[in-house]
Image (cartoon, grey):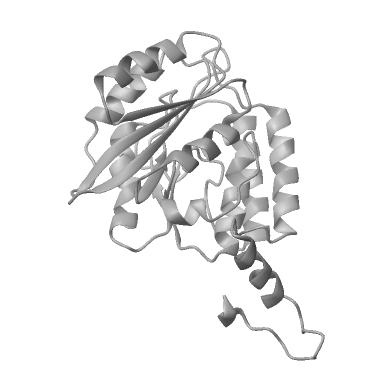
Amino acid sequence: MQTVVSVLMPVYNEEEYVSISIRRVLESPLVDGLTAEIVVVDDGSTDGSIEAVENLATQHPQIRFVKHSANRGKGAAIRTAIQHARGEFAIIQDADLEYDPKEMAKLLQPLVEGKADAVYGSRFQTSGERRVLYFWHAFANRLLTTFCNMVSDLNLTDMETGYKAFRTALVKSIPLRSDRFGIEPEITIKLAQRQARIYEVPITYHGRTYEEGKKIGFRDAVKAFLVILRYGLTRDIYADSGAQILDTLSHTPASTSGWPIHSSLL
C-alpha cells in the first residue's frame, strides 16, 4: 500500500500559473512508495484562478479544492490546507512556480527515511540555479533567519523559504495562528520548541519580481519580526489543551508543594 503525501497549494490570483503548477506537481516523480493528493486552497482570488483549478479538479480526482470566501492571507490558506490534508506527509508547494515541483522528492526523502520531522528547502544553500533578484529582500530574509535562529536555537540558512515539508500529524498537533507570511517563523519556532528534527536541503529558486506578481513586502518583514518576538517568548505549541497544560506545568520551576514537575509526564 502506498503512502500518501499531501501537496498543499495556497492560491491567490495566480490565474497565469496555477494550472501549470498543478500539472507539474502531477507529472513530478516522488519518492518510491509515495502517491500524491493535491490540496488547493484558493484565498479569495478575484481573477480566473478558481475556474482554472475547478477545471483541472474535474479531470484529476487527486485534486481537492477548498475556497476561502475572502482573502485572508497565505498563512490562513496553509492552515486550511493542513486541516484538509490526509497524507502521512505534507509539503507546501506555492502556485507561482518560484519553487520547482520536480524537487519535491528531495524534501520528502528525509521524511520517508524517518530521519526528519520537517525539511526546509534552502534557497541560500543552493547547488543549482538561483535567479538573482533584490539585495534588500535577501538581506531581510537572512536577518529574519538569524533572529529566528537566536530565539529558537537553530542554525537554519533559510527560515523564510516557502518550500517546507512535514509529518502531517505533527503540524496538525501544533496550533498555527498567523494569517499572512508570519506563518514561516511561527511554524519554525514551534517546531523547535517541540524538539522536531529539522533538516535542510539545497533547492533551485526562480524568484519573481513585484511586476511579475511577488506579494511579500517590507511590512511583512516587520510583522515577521514581531511574530518571532511573540512566539519566541511563549510556548503555544499544542493544539490539544490537555497537552498544552502539561507542557506549561513541565516548564514551571516548581509546583506549589515544592516538588518539580518533570517533562516525562508529557
Q: Is residue 51 above or below residue 88?
A: above
Residue 98: which quarter of the image?
A: top left
- Residue 160 in which image quadrant: top right
Name the side, left or right, on which 148 lies relative to 264: right
Q: Residue at x 59, y 34 (%)?
A: 76
- Please indicate, yes or no, whether residue 245 appears anywhere in the rendered image: yes
Residue visible at 21% across and 37% down in the picture? 29
Tally of numbered tags: 0
Place of residue 182 in the rendered image (x, y in percent of width and height, measured from the top left): 65, 40
Q: Quadrant of the C terminus?
A: bottom right
* Residue found farthest to the top: 47
- Relative to 198, 144 lies left or right: right
- In the rendered image, residue 81, in percent from the top left (x then y), is placed at 47, 37
State whether residue 129 appears in this view: no
In this rendered view, identify the residue nearer to me: 24 or 203.
24
Q: Residue furthest bottom?
A: 258
Q: Residue at x 53, y 54 (%)?
A: 156
Q: Residue at x 28, y 31 (%)?
A: 62
Image position of 46 with respect to 200: above or below:
above
The image shows residue 226 at horizontal and vertical percentages of 75, 44
Q: Residue furthest right?
A: 256
* 262 is higher (above) or lower (below) than 78: below
Q: In the image, 121: left or right of 22?
A: right
